[in-house]
Image (spheres, rainbow, N blue to C red):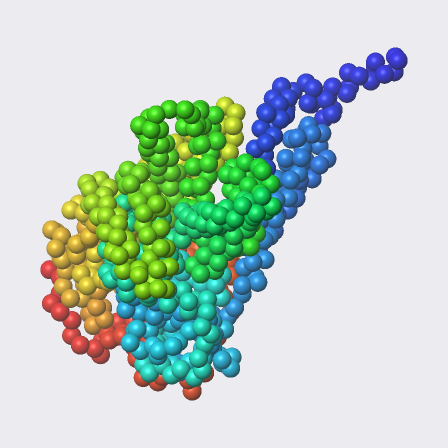
């Protein structure tokens, strides 16, 4: 006994006694015990954290270090006596986070495919893998697998004018065509959409435009995507115009025929989610199928007495969900919604609560395990953020008590229903706001109000009318229902355009810092997934992230990766270098500048001096910027003198050695290394698309070069006027316009 008593004081300093003597450890264990039902919800979050780490960290050494760190945390949870639930949390969390990083790495390596080395015009034979009709742009997009062409990537994407595509082309067909192909383009500006990364995971090694004639060698199968295209075409035939394009999107997810002004109005009004086949559409299809099956089987007394009709209806609903997902192209939101619907149906069959955060977590886990790259896409983030916000809101005891069913009059029930819908819409808009700002640099502000009418209108009027009209078309009686459906769609589009045109309908900000975005998303998840009072700490994280975003100044100078286009923030506003910039370039530059609206040309800005070849302007900060905007000869000595007077010089060509501005010289060699550039003068900061040491596989992929015999020599020898093969200013070219004064 004496020896035991003598040994006891020394035990106080051992880790075994930490849980008994350290208040923080006891509090942590008690808190985790109180949140034990919520802990499983963090498994997909930790998996996603590991996936995000792989995309953020630059090289294999960092990825390996992250996974070893996760393994170390798991080992600490296993070895250190920190308390039962705390130790298990560390062990499982470390393993899952490391697994997420490894899963993304494995998926990227598995998707590896060679990429076209340089632009080229080639003639080739290919098998059609996918056909997408972009009716609004009068284009057909083909995903092709070249046949017996080792010098071409295994998969390419080609756009063709609709009139050049032969009739009957479908998946599985073999075609011969000629196309100008180029490597998949990266982001035009820091924070802009990066198709190069998306193409890597899709296995697309080249993209471009095809030329007539396109010869159909063998016909393809008449199912799947072809059925989707025929159904979309049938709906547009019955409902011409924008209404028919929206109706086709509701049925099949095919958004290619929606006019750009309609799509923009839907985005600005917060109704764009209606155009993508996701939870709303799957739920409507499953609910309608179950109701129809139940009503039909209930007509038989024998079946009602001897069969479990809810189970049969659930099975029919599951088949409807799977079939609808296949018909709509199996995009990530559709697959996520299908998985969620199947889990809901399974819960109903087992007699469990149907819609819970555990259900949402299971759906997210399935999607991330199969497509880990989906995590960094806007579609995944928007869809899961909306669902988590809705379910977390209504799982709360207070909100659940407000809107729980009760005995009351019809008027009060209707008012409570409208209040529930309004509150849900506001919460969803708040949840989606930072995601829209991060990915698109803008977000709608009146979406909650628009959705109060648009969601019931779409769910209970438009979609049932459309489904009934399609069924009655089989006997030639669908015309009256198509007319009614068209009127309902007209009301939906009127709501979208009215809300989109309202003053202050859109909030626009420049690129959101990645750290600020992480704080907002992390704080939102912390607030939504916990149930004790600790959850409110998430509000602080959200406020800090949003404050960081608002405090981040808009860039003063934006330069696209080819150097041809730039936007400069002057005292009179942000303006473009080239007046004839295309719609895509204008949209990218306005989004990068955090501006909602058209950008004027520098020629129209007071104080700017421009001619056909050069443009000199002063930024809002006072920095002087000189940019070239033609391919014609400019006297090198005169240009060098101008370079010495300005702070920044920008050119799509190689500048003379003697061109030495005071701050930055950004020309073709620099842009080839950096990609697009965003410059802030006060405080001084330069952000680039490309980063030194970034070893993600799509940055420096394995490349293929078409053999000379397949390359059109007219294109190979072509080069822009006014520059030699190295892109330098060429004194042998045409004389320049009058110099700047």
Q: Is 430 drawn above or below residue 254 in the view shown?
A: above
Q: Residue at x 23, y 48 (%)?
A: 491
Q: Residue at x 36, y 48 (%)?
A: 273
Q: Is 218 drawn above or below residue 401 in the view shown?
A: below
User: Residue 380: x and y, percent?
Assistant: 45, 49
Image-quadrant location for residue 348: top right
Q: Between 526 and 174, which is closer to the camera in this rendering?
A: 174
Q: Between 686 and 337, which is closer to the camera in this rendering?
A: 337
User: Residue 301: x and y, percent?
Assistant: 54, 46
- Image quadrant for the C terminus? bottom left
Q: Between 351 and 388, which is closer to the camera in this rendering?
A: 351
- Image quadrant for the N terminus? top right
Looking at the image, residue 645 sits to the left or right of residue 206; the answer is: left
Looking at the image, residue 78 sits to the left or right of residue 587; the answer is: right
User: Residue 188: x and y, percent?
Assistant: 34, 58
Looking at the image, residue 480 sits to the left or right of residue 200; the answer is: left
Q: How many marks?
A: 0
Image-quadrant location for residue 215: bottom left
Q: Is 265 drawn above or below residue 518 in the view shown?
A: below
Q: Is residue 577 visible?
A: yes
Q: Is residue 286 visible?
A: no
Q: Residue at x 77, y 20 (%)?
A: 11
């Amino acid at each position: 006994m004496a020896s035991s008593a003598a040994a006891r004081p020394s035990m106080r300093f051992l880790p075994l006694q930490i849980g008994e003597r350290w208040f923080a450890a006891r509090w942590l264990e008690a808190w985790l015990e109180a949140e034990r039902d919520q802990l499983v919800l963090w498994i997909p979050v930790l998996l996603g954290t590991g996936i995000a780490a792989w995309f953020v960290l630059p090289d294999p050494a960092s990825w390996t270090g992250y996974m070893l760190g996760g393994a170390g945390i798991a080992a600490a949870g296993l070895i250190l006596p920190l308390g039962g639930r705390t130790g298990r949390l560390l062990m499982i969390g470390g393993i899952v986070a490391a697994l997420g990083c490894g899963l993304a790495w494995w998926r990227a390596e598995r998707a590896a495919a060679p990429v076209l080395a340089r632009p080229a015009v080639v003639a080739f034979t290919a098998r059609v893998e996918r056909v997408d009709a972009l009716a609004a742009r009068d284009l057909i997009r083909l995903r092709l697998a070249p046949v017996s062409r080792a010098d071409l990537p295994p998969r390419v994407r080609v756009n063709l004018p609709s009139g050049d595509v032969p009739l009957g082309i479908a998946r599985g067909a073999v075609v011969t065509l000629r196309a100008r192909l180029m490597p998949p383009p990266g982001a035009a500006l820091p924070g802009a959409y990066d198709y190069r990364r998306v193409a890597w995971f899709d296995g697309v090694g080249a993209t471009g435009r095809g030329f007539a004639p396109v010869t159909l060698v063998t016909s393809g199968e008449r199912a799947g995507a072809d059925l989707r295209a025929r159904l979309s075409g049938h709906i547009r035939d019955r409902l011409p115009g924008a209404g028919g394009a929206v109706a086709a999107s509701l049925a099949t997810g095919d958004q290619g025929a929606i006019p750009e002004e309609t799509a923009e109005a839907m985005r600005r009004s917060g109704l764009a989610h209606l155009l993508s086949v996701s939870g709303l559409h799957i739920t409507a299809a499953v609910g309608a199928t179950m109701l129809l099956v139940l009503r039909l089987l209930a007509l038989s007394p024998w079946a009602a007495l001897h069969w479990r009709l809810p189970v049969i209806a659930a099975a029919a609903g599951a088949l409807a969900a799977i079939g609808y997902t296949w018909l709509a192209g199996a995009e990530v939101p559709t697959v996520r919604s299908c998985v969620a619907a199947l889990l809901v149906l399974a819960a109903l069959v087992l007699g469990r609560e149907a819609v819970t955060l555990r259900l949402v977590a299971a759906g997210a886990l399935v999607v991330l395990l199969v497509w880990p790259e989906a995590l960094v896409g806007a579609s995944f983030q928007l869809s899961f953020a909306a669902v988590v916000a809705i379910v977390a809101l209504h799982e709360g005891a207070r909100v659940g008590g407000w809107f729980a069913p009760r005995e009351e009059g019809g008027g009060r029930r209707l008012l409570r229903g409208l209040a529930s819908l309004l509150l849900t819409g506001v919460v969803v808009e708040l949840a989606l706001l930072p995601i829209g700002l991060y990915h698109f640099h803008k977000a709608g502000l009146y979406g909650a109000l628009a959705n109060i009418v648009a969601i019931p209108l779409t769910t209970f009027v438009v979609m049932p009318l459309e489904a009934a009209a399609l069924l009655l078309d089989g006997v030639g009686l669908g015309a009256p229902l198509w007319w009614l459906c068209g009127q309902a769609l007209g009301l939906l589009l009127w709501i979208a355009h009215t809300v989109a045109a309202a003053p202050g309908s859109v909030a626009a900000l420049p690129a959101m810092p990645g750290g600020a975005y992480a704080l907002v998303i992390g704080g939102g998840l912390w607030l939504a997934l916990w149930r004790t009072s600790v959850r409110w700490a998430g509000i602080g994280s959200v406020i800090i992230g949003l404050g960081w975003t608002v405090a981040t100044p808009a860039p003063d100078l934006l330069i696209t990766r080819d150097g041809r286009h730039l936007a400069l923030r002057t005292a009179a506003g942000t303006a473009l270098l080239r007046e004839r910039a295309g719609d895509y370039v204008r949209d990218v530059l306005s989004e990068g500048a955090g501006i909602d609206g058209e950008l004027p040309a520098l020629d129209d800005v007071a104080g700017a001096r421009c001619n056909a070849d050069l443009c000199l302007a002063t930024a809002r900060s006072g920095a002087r910027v000189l940019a070239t905007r033609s391919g014609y000869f400019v006297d090198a000595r005169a240009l060098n003198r101008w370079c010495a007077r300005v702070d920044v010089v920008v050119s799509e060509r190689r500048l003379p050695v003697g061109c030495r501005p005071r701050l930055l010289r950004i020309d073709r060699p620099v842009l080839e290394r950096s990609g697009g550039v965003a410059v802030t003068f006060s405080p001084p900061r330069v952000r680039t698309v490309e980063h030194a040491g970034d070893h993600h596989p799509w940055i420096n992929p394995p490349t293929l070069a078409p053999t000379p015999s397949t390359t059109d020599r007219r294109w190979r020898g072509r080069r822009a006027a006014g520059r030699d093969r190295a892109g330098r200013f060429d004194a042998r070219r045409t004389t320049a316009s009058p110099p700047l004064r």
